[in-house]
């Protein structure tokens, strides 16, 4: 015997969606803390699309398609013989990464990608038109974006002294992503 009415189950489902949204917001403010997320559903009542969306949200993704793309990306990563600096960058991850960046950091990223495979710090700063203090301040945004983008372990470029380096395939992905996202 079911003690909940259809209306109360729907309300519970809506509350669960709301809580998953709150969990996502809370996760971005909690560092180095694991969070257990429980998704409860009744297969006879709840729509599978809403349950799948709850699951996507619990991973910090916006859509079910992003959830499926992440799984496909992970399978590809395991099977590929891609060089280590390229193996985890996908279009989906790059989109999420660049949206985490401050506008000044996006300018810097574009300048590095435009000049790939190597660019000097001076040429990147000059091409962005940023003052030295703004340029230096934008660097913290890259680390923040790495920490807050699921599946990303490092910046899409490397810095060695006064030289930035970025693999050409990553540079193409960066430029395509920035253009598609309107940045």
Image (cartoon, rainbow, N blue to C red):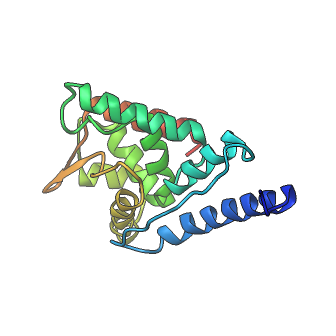
Residue most extreme to the left: 161
For the image shown, how many numbered marks are present on the structure?
0
**Residue 37 visible in the current orientation:** yes
Give how far across and how far down residue 124 sits, in percent.
Answer: 32, 50
**Residue 129 visible in the current orientation:** no
Based on the displayed image, in which of its 4 quarters is residue 133 positioned? Answer: bottom left
Based on the displayed image, in which of its 4 quarters is residue 105 positioned? Answer: bottom left
Left or right of residue 159: residue 16: right
On the rendered image, what quadrant is the N terminus found in?
bottom right
Left or right of residue 139: residue 54: right
**Rendered position, 21 above or below 87:** below
Q: Which of 105 and 81 is in front in this view?
A: 81
Residue at the (61%, 52%) spot, across then down: 54
Give how far across and how far down residue 93 sits, in percent.
Answer: 43, 43
**Rendered position, 15 above or below 146:** below
Q: Which of 57 and 99 is in front in this view?
A: 57
Residue at the (38%, 64%) spot, across then down: 144
Residue at the (56%, 67%) spot, across then down: 23
Give how far across and how far down residue 159 sits, in percent.
Answer: 19, 53
Q: Which of 2 and 62 is in front in this view?
A: 2
Residue most extreme to the front: 1
Left or right of residue 75: residue 183: right
Give how far across and how far down residue 9 sits, in percent.
Answer: 78, 58
Residue at the (64%, 67%) spot, across then down: 19
**Rendered position, 113 above or below 19:** above
């Amino acid at each position: 015997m079911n003690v909940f009415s259809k209306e109360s189950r729907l309300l519970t489902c809506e509350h669960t969606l709301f809580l998953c949204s709150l969990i996502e917001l809370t996760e971005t403010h909690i560092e180095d803390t694991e969070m257990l997320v429980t998704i409860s559903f009744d297969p006879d009542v709840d729509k599978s699309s809403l349950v799948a969306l709850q699951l996507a949200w619990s991973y910090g993704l916006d859509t079910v398609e992003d959830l499926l793309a992440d799984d496909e990306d992970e399978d590809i990563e395991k099977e590929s013989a891609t060089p280590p600096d390229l193996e985890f960058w996908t279009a989906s991850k790059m989109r999420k990464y660049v949206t985490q960046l401050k506008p000044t950091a996006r300018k810097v990223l574009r300048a590095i990608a435009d000049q790939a495979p190597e660019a000097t710090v001076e040429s990147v700063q000059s091409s962005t038109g940023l003052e030295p203090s703004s340029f230096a301040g934008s660097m913290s945004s890259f680390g923040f974006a790495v920490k807050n983008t699921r599946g990303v372990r490092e910046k899409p470029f490397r810095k060695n002294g006064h030289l930035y380096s970025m693999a050409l395939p990553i540079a193409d992905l960066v430029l395509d992503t920035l253009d598609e996202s309107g940045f």
